[in-house]
Image (tube, rainbow, N blue to C red):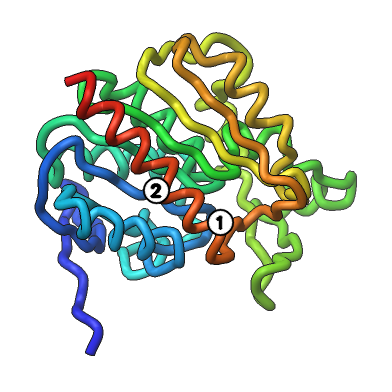
Amino acid sequence: MVQAPEILTRDDGATIAYYQIPGKTPGVVFLTGFKSDMTGGKAIALEELCQARGQAYLRFDYFGHGQSSGAFEDGTIGRWADDAVCALDQLCEGPQVLVGSSMGGWIMLLAALARPDRVAGLVGTAAAPDFTEDLMALSPEQVRQLDAQGFVEIPNCYDEEPYKITKALLDDGKNHLLLRGEIRLDCPVRLIHGTNDEDVPWQTSLTTQDKLRSTDVETLFVKNGDHRLSEPRDLARLCKTVERLLDQLEHDA
C-alpha cells in the first residue's frame, strides 16, 4: 500500500504534496522536471540513497504537478521556484543540497539565489535554465495562436497528451532568465548531461558552468545519453555524484 503524501498548505491556500525522511544534514531536496512528479525513478533512487546514509531527504510536487493542488496550465517558473523556496523554508532544517532534473535545474538555481545561505550544493541532471526563452521556438502560426487564445499546444514525446504552453509561462520565464549574465552562486555545483539529449542540448550545461561564479563546478557528459537519463546506470551515476558531493561537504564542514 502506497503511503499518502504529507501536505504543506501555502498562505494562498494552495497545497504542496511531499514525502520526507528525517536525517543528518546537509539534507537533499529533489526538484522535478516540467510536468513531471515526485514519484519518478530519480526521486526514488535518491530517497533510497539518503535512507541508507541517514541523510535527510525531501521530494515534492510543484503547483499543478502530481498530487499538489492547482492546474498545470496556471503555473509559471516564478510560481514553481517560489514553491521550492517555500518547501526549503518550511520543511527543511540546516543546509541542503538541491538536485534538479531538467526544469528542476532552473528551479534549483533560482531557489539557491533566493536562499544562498541555506544551499550547500547543487546537482543538475539535464538542467534546463532559460528553456522557455531558448528552447521553445514557436512557428508564426503558433505565435498567432498564442496571441489569440493565450496558449498553444505542442507535442509531448513522453505522453499522448500535448503540452499546453501558456503566454503567462513564456512571459514569466523572461523575468527569471539566468544565462544572460553571471549566476552569483559560490557553492559547489555538479552538472550531468547526455550528449544525445534532444530536449535540452548539452551545450546548455557548458553555458551554465561558464556563467556560474563558483569555481567548484564539474560537468559530466554521458556519451549517447538521452534527456531523461533514467536507466539503472544513469540513476547509479546520479546517486554517486550526489554521494561524492555530500562526502565533500561533510569533509569540509
Point 65% across, 51% down: residue:
150
Residue 119 falls in image quadrant: top left
Point 34% across, 59% down: residue:
61
Q: Is residue 133 above or below residue 159?
A: above
Q: What's the distance in space between the residues labelled 2 and 1, CA to CA?
A: 17 Å
Of the numbered discs in the image, which one, if any, rests on residue 234?
Answer: 1
Give the amino acid at mark 1. Answer: Asp
Asked whether 100 or 181 is in front, the reply is 100
x, y percent for residue 98: 34, 38
Q: How many marks?
A: 2
Residue that numbered label 2 is attached to: 31
Residue 181 falls in image quadrant: top right
Q: Secondary structure at mark 1?
A: helix
x, y percent for residue 222: 67, 45
Give the amino acid at mark 2. Answer: Leu
Q: Nearer the viewer, mark 2 or mark 1?
A: 1
Q: Secondary structure at mark 2?
A: strand
Q: Residue furthest right?
A: 140
Left/right of residue 83 with respect to residue 6 in the rendered view: right
Q: Is residue 104 above or below residue 37?
A: above
Q: Quadrant of the N terminus?
A: bottom left
x, y percent for residue 83: 31, 45
Q: Is residue 1 above or below residue 174?
A: below
Q: Quadrant of the C terminus?
A: top left
Point 22% across, 24% down: residue:
251
Closer to the chain start, of discs 2 and 1, is 2
Does residue 135 show up?
yes
